[in-house]
Amino acid sequence: MKIVNACALLSFLIMAAVSAPTLAQSRLEMRDIQSAQFSGNRIGILPQRKVTVYLPPHYSDRLRRFPVVYFLNTYGEDHTAPFANHDAKALLDDAIAKGQVADVIVVTADFLTPLGTTWYVNSSVTGNWQDFMIKELVPYIDANYRTMPTAASRAVVGDRMGGHGAIRFGMQYPDVFGVVYAMHPVGTGNGVQPGYTRGNWQTIYAAKTLEDLKTDIYSPIFLSIYQAFLPNPNKPPLYADLPVTLIEGKPALDPAITARLQNSFSLDHLIPIYAANMKRLRALKIDWGRNDTLYDHIYSNQAFVHKLDEYDIPYEAEEYHGGWGDKTWGPDGRFATDLVPFLNKNLLFP
């Protein structure tokens, strides 16, 4: 009798295990997009762009559609970085499980160049990154995933250089992105130290390849800016008009080229042009760390939001206790504690 009961119990447990519902789980998908936007680039950008897509736990419910968040990375990070380096999947899973945000799709793409970043704009030297985002990436995601394909359900957010890109996309495309969050953005305006003094001009003018610039921090960063905003495909090997020339070995500023750079790169110069667009956004937030060792970032972000005030553009802004990207990730980082609730509050969910 005991043997029969034991067998019956074992059969019951097996059947229960087989019939038990599987808990919904998120997953990451890797995709390649064959782009038409890089045929004329001068620096070896491949037309095949890689994309990582976070699909939330309940994406398996085929009757549901989901908002989409496009995350733009900082300098030197590719599409895998939020997940491989910062465990963004676990942070999103935890936030969804706790009800801090509803299920949302998150997309990251490879915007890397040999100098670290594209600045998310069209360039005759680095390629048409802005067009890749608007004309190819967003339509591809909407065509291949169950998205809610409206600006109200689509956000663009970014970290540092990616924060610059997020603001720029929000300025220019409020019909595509209704929600914008820029985490510690750079390039929002003038700093305290003039930008042309950052790079090593002797190194820049001596460079025979882009690799030759990577002997200090600022030279490759600032040349990436010049390739994006002062591109010149007929000026190898750096392929940019430079705002400084060397006269007897000393740097001399070119005012006309500097004005071109300021008018295209500095986001505060774009506020008067795109103020009406920015007022159409559902939500805009900017934050920055008050302990950033490069005070220019703090100063320019403070000035940027004051200029938003001048044009009566709604926004949220926060200066928090932190430095250069040191409070972004982890369970207590701002991605989890500030960005996620902001998205939940302002995106349109089904």
Image: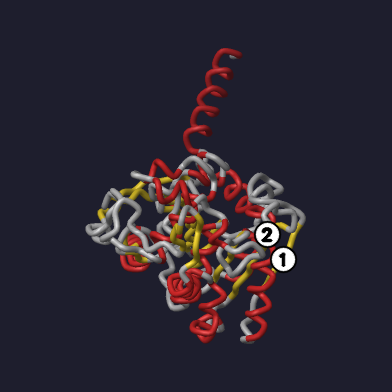
Give the residue type at disc 2: Asp
Type of amino acid at the residue the image marks with label 1: Glu
Q: Residue 174, percent across and down?
A: 47, 77
Residue 321: % across, % down: 77, 55
Residue closest to the eye, 326 or 334: 326
Q: Answer with left or right where residue 274 lies relative to residue 285.
A: left
Q: Nearer the viewer, residue 149 or 22?
A: 149
User: Is 188 placed left or right of 234 in the picture?
Assistant: right
Q: Kindly identify the residue that appears in the image at 49 percent across and 31 percent down.
A: 15
Q: Residue furthest right?
A: 321
Callout 1 secondary element = strand
Dividing the picture into quadrants, the one containing residue 281 is bottom right
Say how many tags the image has.
Answer: 2
Q: Quadrant of residue 62?
A: bottom left
Name the residue that disc number 1 marks. 318
Q: What's the distance in space between the residues labelled 1 and 2, CA to CA?
A: 10 Å
Q: Is residue 34 above or below residue 89?
A: below
Please state which of the two labelled residues, at mark 1 or mark 2, is closer to the viewer.
1
Of residues 9 and 251, the one drawn nearer to the viewer in this rendering: 251
In what quadrant of the picture does the N terminus appear? top right
For the point 48% across and 57% down, the residue is 105
Is 70 located above or below residue 330 in the figure?
Answer: below
Residue 38 visible (yes or no) = yes
Which structural element holds mark 2?
helix
Instruction: Report if the CB atoms under discs 1 and 2 are less than 8 Å apart.
Output: yes
Q: Which mark is residue 338?
A: 2
Residue 161: x percent and y percent? Answer: 53, 57
Give the label on residue 242, or none: none
- Can residue 63 be seen? no
Q: Position of residue 250 (x, y in %)?
A: 51, 56
Q: Quadrant of residue 175?
A: bottom left
